[in-house]
Amino acid sequence: MAKISVSRLTKMKQDNQKITCMTAYDASFAAIFDQAGIQVLLVGDSLGMVLQGHDSTLPVTVDDIRYHTAAVVSTAKSAFIIADLPFMSYSTPEMSYENAAILMRAGANMVKMEGGEWLTDSVKGLVERGIPVCGHLGLTPQSVNIFGGYKVQGREEEQANELLNDALLLQEAGIQLLVLECVPVSLADRITAALQIPVIGIGAGCETDGQILVMHDAFGVSAGFCPKFSKNFLLETGDIRQAVTLYIDQVESRQFPSAEHSFY
Ligand code: KIV
């Protein structure tokens, strides 16, 4: 299968075809996801929690993401690969250029950053320098200490309007994908409809252009708790490859996420 490009993902949004995404951190799982037809793999800083056992993503370093990106790239031949810029690695535009370059040299196709309006200068600068950017709004786990926990964001009208405005500003600055995490369905629907770029949801209902899950949650093997918005696809199938196929089928047919995995 040909390598997935960002223009293909944009076309999928235009054609109303769901985009399937999963986190991946190593060569073996990346191969399984790639061969099953998952379009986007994210080397997420969630690895700090599910691989390293921390209670947040804050301890993750650029070198951790570089290492796992190289592993994923080695076997994922078709999937589009996004690498997370970890906590405090993009505090200034200059830091974002330097650290994004490390991840792109490791083989990433795009870097992801958490935050709204304050990131627009970095996004413009990265895009001008040839580095594609994915935004991340809603529950941004690197800000867990500001939020006071992993809580649904955008429940109040004012914060919802701010998130919509941030999404529009980031799109204008040049992001080509947006991850939207843990927001009420009504807000996710507004943002998805307002943007031309694909919106990938996690805990954001089934109307976003695509879905992403942390792979350990999708297999029910996370050491901590399994979030309400996730589902254990291994439980129904008992086989990892079949679980991945079931995830793809249920996202494409809009069976996942259902109301029980969504916030209202
Ligand atoms: O780090 C990660 O895995 C993420 C997903 C939760 C979207 O950012």
Image (tube, grey):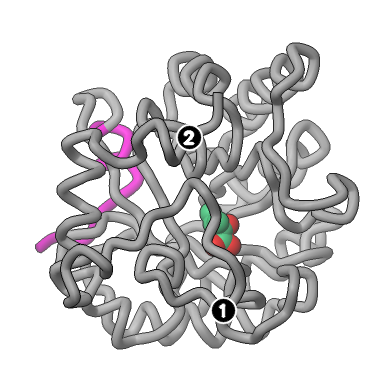
- Label drawn at residue 223: 1
Residue interval drawn in magenta: 1-12
Whole-percent x, y for residue 199 in the image? 45, 34
Q: Marks 2 and 1, how far apart in space?
A: 22 Å
Query: In the rendered image, is residue 131 in sight?
Result: no
Regarding ligand 1, which quadrant of the image does it lie in?
Answer: bottom right
Q: Mark 2 points at which residue?
A: 262
**SS category of the residue bearing label 1:** loop
Q: In this view, does 234 lie above or below 153?
A: below
At horizontal 29% and vertical 87% (from top left) the residue drawn is: 28
Quarter of image, res 4? bottom left
Which amino acid does the dot numbered 1 rest on?
Ala
Whole-percent x, y for residue 174 in the image? 58, 35
Q: Is residue 45 above or below residue 263?
A: below
At horizontal 14% and vertical 68% (from top left) the residue drawn is: 242
Q: Which of 163 and 204 is in front in this view?
A: 204
Whole-percent x, y for residue 184 in the image? 57, 26
Circle 2 Cα neighbour tier, 10 Å, few/some/many (<14 / 14–19 / ≥20)? many
Disc 2 under 8 Å from ligand 1? The reply is: no
**In the displayed structure, does residue 174 sit left or right of residue 121?**
left
Quarter of image, res 119? top right
Which amino acid does the dot numbered 2 rest on?
Ser
Q: In which quadrant is the C terminus drawn? A: top right
Residue 6 belongs to magenta span: yes
Counting residues from the start of the chain, the first of labels 2 and 1 encountered is: 1
Whole-percent x, y for residue 44 in the image? 55, 66
Query: In the rendered image, is residue 168 in sight?
Result: yes
Q: In which quadrant is the N terminus drawn? A: bottom left
